[in-house]
Image (cartoon, rainbow, N blue to C red):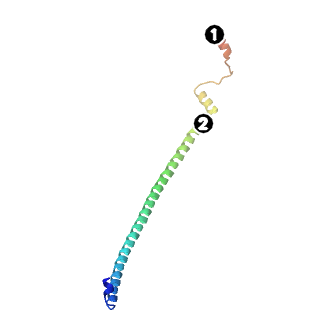
Amino acid sequence: MAILALPPLIRPRLALKQVVENVSDAQSALASQRLDTRNFIFVIASAITLNFLVIAGINILMTQDAFTLQELKSQRNTALDQKDAILNIVNQKNSPVNLSNVAIQMGMVPATKIGYFNYSELNAQVTR
């Protein structure tokens, strides 16, 4: 009410002072808002950079695991090839022709007559 009691010539000057004070307050608020915006952008940029670094680290680890897996697959294939080669050698040694040649070298003689067991006659002889 005191402002309304002042003469009209002084009233605009007080209003002008209030406007200037309001403008300076607005500028300081705007400056702090800009500072807050800069901090926000810095935090977001830091988060994005950290995210990219984590993704790059995971990618490096996955690549290393892929190389290890490839090396293990190669070793497995080599072992399977060696196993197949050994089985081929065993099969060659176990062939009937090879077995008969080894038996002859050991002094065994091929049978001229093939004989068979009759289990029913053997059971009858054993029970008597």
Residue 17, by quadrant, is bottom left
- Which residue in the protein does label 2 denote? 91
Left or right: 100, with 59 as reference point = right
Residue at image x 35%, y 81%?
Answer: 22
Q: Position of residue 73 (x, y in %)?
A: 52, 49
- Which residue in the protein does label 1 denote? 127
Residue 82, by quadrant, is top right
Q: Position of residue 75 (x, y in %)?
A: 51, 47
**Disc with the residue nearer the chain's start (1 vs 2):** 2
Outermost residue, top direction?
128
Residue at image x 66%, y 11%?
Answer: 124
Of circles 1 and 2, the one toward us is 1
Q: Position of residue 72 (x, y in %)?
A: 50, 48
Question: Mark 1 belongs to which amino acid?
Answer: Thr
Tell me, yes or no, whether the two marked residues, 1 and 2, touch with CB atoms within 8 Å: no
Q: Nearer the viewer, residue 8 or 112?
A: 8
Q: Position of residue 12 (x, y in %)?
A: 34, 89
> If the image is split into quadrants, where does the C terminus sit?
top right
* Secondary structure type for disc 1: helix
Residue at image x 51%, y 52%?
Answer: 70
Left or right: 22, with 74 as reference point = left
Q: Nearer the viewer, residue 74 or 60?
A: 60
Other residues around mark 1 within 10 Å, as few (<14) / some (14–19) / many (≥20): few
Q: Nearer the viewer, residue 4 or 77?
A: 4
